[in-house]
Amino acid sequence: MNHSKKDMRSGKQDQTSIDRRTLLAGTSALGAAALLPAQTKAQSPASASLPARGEFVVRGAYVLSMDDKVGDFPVGDVHVRDGVIVAVAASVAAPGAQVIDGKGMICMPGLVDTHWHHWTTFLRPALRADDPKKTYFPVTFAVGLHYTPDDSYQSVKLSLAEAISAGVTTTHNWAHNVRSPAHADAEVRAMRESGLRGRFAYGPALGMPNEQPMDLADWSRMKKDLAKDDLIGLGICSRNIDATNASRGAINAEMAKKEWGAARDLGLPITLHTNGSANIQLLAANNLLGKDVQLVHPLNLLPGDFELLAKHDVRYSTSPIGEAGRTGETQLSELLQAGVKVSISIDNVTADRCDCFACAKMLQTLNRHRTAGKYNLTTRKLVQMMTIDGAVDLGLADKTGSLTPGKRADLILVKTGTPNMKQVGDPYDALVQQTQPSDIDTVVADGRILLRKREFTALDYDKVAADANQAFESLKTRAKFS
């Protein structure tokens, strides 16, 4: 890798129409689906199956701290002890610590995803890109009504394995098919077993009546459970507050006030899919906007919306790969110029893949196309959106998102010797324009080494994939899906 100062940057809906009768038909399955197999009960952190935390130092890497006070080091060390970043410098004395050779690597914070529907992942075999009846929305709705807690567990576990492999150390599990408390427990169990940091956004059951509130009582139960968990937090994902996506719910403002009020009474952050200016204006008219709100998919907004969002300190999560195929444009430059905090998300890996670098590249390309270069979206800013900006969005910037002494050790090593990464000049340019998930060599989450030399250190991927496939086949039979 070329380490010259010249090259180093400063540290400084588409969906099938579904009628109301079809929506309500799925609610009869809610009670029956609440039976949780013994092997999916989840009330413990499951740390026994994860690698132990220890002391190690990454030596000789190109260190991108994403912290202006720490800076970047063309050749630097990162010292970790018991899950905490102890030191980041050009050279660190760490006698007795395990040494991880970082030569030819970029060492940077782990990637932070801020919106991902993990429950849909194991449905990949059912999707067909060229068959309108078997694209994402109709398939997830058709079989989602029949999920058992074990289905939720197996799909989330498969999804998180891909997250680790792609360098994601924090994820926002946007669970908008929580069919019972047992389903919620199953998803959290999978998250705990992965070793990743994240938030579980407790959502509705697919197909539930819009007039029926979500399980507010279970939010309280789960908040108490997760209060004891250092890695997993709790939030709420709201049903749409309009009729743009009926299969995911379309509640009115009064129901939103009831559910959002309950969430706020518990101190839980809220996230919501949006599409267009009408959503923003409706939220504003009903005094629902606030710094505890994350909106998803910045499409079809109007000039006055951006200042309104900034005024209320609302965050926005963009999923650029999926959004590029929707009606409207991802309005990133307008949001950033207005001062709105924006992060990057995967959305789903049912029809796409986990590739934060491709998301950043897509945003770079869309910005050039939309603004003709008039808005300077730097590659450093895009890497920031993948890391510290995501941590800010999820309220985790005190723990993760940068290589800052005192923060938890969430970091990755990116190989620069692969054919697509040879002759790296500017590391930020390389990450946005050349890097692929297969370039991830090492993944550390909360001080635990989960991936080393592209091998899982604890997770048995073949078993995870086989179990997910078996569960999917059983689901197809129950759902009479072919």
Image: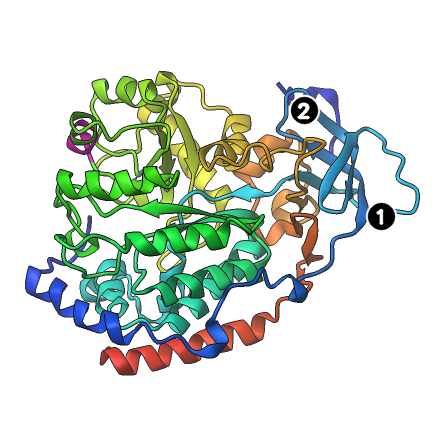
Q: Is residue 279 magenta?
A: yes
Q: Residue at x 32, y 42 (%)?
A: 263
Using the image, tell me which numbered label, if any, was put on residue 404. Answer: none
Using the image, tell me which numbered label, if any, was put on residue 99. Answer: 1
Sort mark 1 into few (<14), some (14-19) or many (20+) by Cα contacts within 10 Å.
some
Q: Which residues are magenta?
A: 276-281
Amino acid type of disc 1?
A: Val
Locate the C terminus by quadrant: bottom left
Work out whether 54 lies above or below 360: below
- Which one is earlier in the sequence, the residue at label 2 or at label 1? 2
Do we see residue 324 in this rendering? no
Between 312 and 345, the one lying in front of the other is 312
Q: Is residue 261 left or right of residue 170?
A: left
Using the image, tell me which numbered label, if any, was put on residue 7. Answer: 2
Q: Is residue 220 left or right of residue 23?
A: right
Q: Classify residue 69 by image quadrant.
A: top right
Q: Residue at x 23, y 58 (%)?
A: 137
Residue 460 locus on image (x, y percent): 61, 71
Amino acid type of disc 2?
A: Asp
